[in-house]
């Protein structure tokens, strides 16, 4: 029966909540699910893999999310902030390696005012690349300002559509505000990325199914999802569970329901499985987001433990991932990597 549901999703790109739950609960059809997602990826997007270089420019955050190592209550982390010129220089070096898309990511750090961010965005945009921001919840006016400065895309994960679960894990934050931010980004013409964490404490299969339907309903342009990995410096440090294969299942279902969007093979997947990004690329993903931050900062952006590639240089990461992409018969895209409508 679930094989029939996979065939339905591959052809019609639609499933009900009950059908999603049925597939998520059935591990006997994983191989068929992954192959179907890979076929849909190839049909709609071809064999190109988009590289997006991430600059993690500040690990300061005013939020206190229970699952995140950057939470403001964590006193065991060494905090850092990159200067505006340092960020621009990192982007310039990444472009020289061959990146056509740059992601600027940080905790929710109010140190970077509008003028600073405008300077950073405009200078990177002038390099002829796409600029993605991942800075958390901001006002409509701030999002508008970034957009007018040249930002193309924005990543803001919903984390979970289960409001009760969200409230328990994100103290001082409002689930409705999270949704409102995503709506604001859509109105402003960003390519909007969202996503969820898979394997959170008290998360149910039902709520994961709701997450997938939420992505479908909002017609997200990018979905970044990954396994929850417990951090020793958070209240959830003792919650240990291997969520790798469930993350791949969720990602594959997202590909079947949203066939032309961009889906990254996340670094968290490879932190749990040494072939994680390759498996993801063969199960529906079409994007890889290597870290292009340099020096000790690569280790200090410690959202979760066991992060890969922290001892490598950005150039080494670039060459490594190109080799992996080529090893499975895929090619690195030379385009900006916008969603193919």
Image (spheres, rainbow, N blue to C red):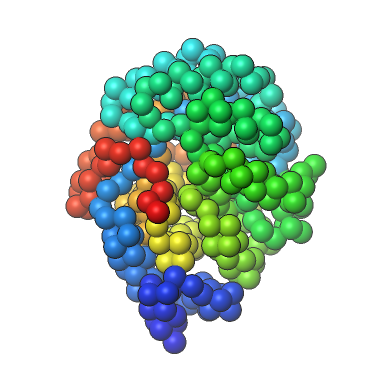
Q: Is residue 48 left or right of residue 24?
A: left
Nearer the observer, 28 or 144:
144
Q: Quadrant of the N terminus?
A: bottom left
Q: In this view, does 142 lie above or below 247?
A: above
Q: In this view, does 233 lie above or below 37?
A: above
Considering every residue shown, the one lying at the far bottom of the view is: 1
Q: Is residue 132 left or right of residue 96?
A: right
Q: Can residue 232 be seen from the camera position used here? A: no
Nearer the observer, 40 or 308:
40
Residue 301 lies, in percent from the top left, at 54, 30
Q: In which quarter of the image is the C terminus?
A: bottom left
Considering every residue shown, the one lying at the far right of the view is: 172
Q: Is residue 22 left or right of residue 255?
A: right
What is the tally of numbered marks visible in this picture? 0
Q: Is residue 81 above or below residue 145?
A: above
Q: In which quarter of the image is residue 41?
A: bottom left
Q: In which quarter of the image is residue 145?
A: top right
At x 40%, y 57%, the residue is 260
Residue 44 lies, in percent from the top left, at 32, 60
At x 72%, y 53%, the residue is 166
Q: Can residue 191 be seen from the camera position used here? A: yes
Q: Is residue 1 above or below residue 270?
A: below
At x 30%, y 33%, the residue is 318
Residue 107 lies, in percent from the top left, at 62, 32
Q: Is residue 198 left or right of residue 338?
A: right
Nearer the observer, 245 or 84:
84
Residue 84 lies, in percent from the top left, at 53, 15
At x 58%, y 62%, the residue is 217
């Amino acid at each position: 029966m679930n094989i029939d549901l996979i065939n339905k999703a591959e052809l019609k790109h639609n499933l009900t909540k009950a059908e999603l739950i049925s597939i998520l609960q059935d591990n006997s059809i994983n191989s068929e699910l992954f192959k179907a997602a890979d076929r849909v990826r190839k049909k709609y997007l071809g064999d190109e893999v988009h590289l997006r270089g991430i600059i993690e420019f500040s690990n300061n955050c005013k939020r206190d999310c229970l699952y995140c190592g950057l939470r403001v209550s964590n006193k065991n982390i060494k905090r850092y902030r990159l200067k505006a010129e340092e960020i621009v220089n990192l982007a310039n070096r990444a472009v020289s390696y061959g990146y056509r898309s740059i992601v600027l990511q940080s905790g929710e750090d109010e140190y970077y005012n509008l003028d600073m961010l405008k300077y950073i965005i405009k200078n990177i945009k002038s390099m002829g690349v796409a600029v993605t921001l991942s800075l958390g919840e901001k006002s409509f006016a701030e999002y508008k300002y970034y957009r007018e400065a040249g930002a193309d895309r924005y990543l803001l994960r919903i984390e979970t559509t289960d409001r009760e679960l969200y409230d328990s894990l994100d103290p001082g934050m409002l689930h409705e505000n999270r949704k409102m931010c995503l709506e604001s980004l859509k109105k402003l013409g960003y390519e909007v990325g969202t996503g969820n964490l898979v394997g959170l404490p008290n998360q149910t299969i039902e709520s994961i199914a709701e997450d997938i339907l939420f992505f479908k309903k909002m017609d997200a342009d990018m979905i970044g999802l990954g396994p929850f990995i417990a951090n020793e410096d958070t209240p959830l440090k003792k919650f240990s569970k291997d969520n790798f294969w469930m993350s791949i299942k969720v990602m594959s279902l997202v590909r079947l329901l949203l066939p032309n969007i961009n889906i990254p093979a996340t670094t968290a997947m490879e932190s749990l499985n040494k072939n994680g990004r390759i498996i993801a690329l063969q199960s529906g993903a079409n994007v890889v987001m290597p870290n292009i931050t340099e020096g000790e900062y690569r280790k200090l952006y410690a959202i979760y433990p066991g992060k890969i590639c922290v001892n490598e240089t950005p150039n080494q990461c670039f060459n490594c991932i190109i080799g992996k992409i080529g090893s499975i018969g895929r090619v690195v895209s030379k385009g900006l990597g916008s969603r193919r409508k």
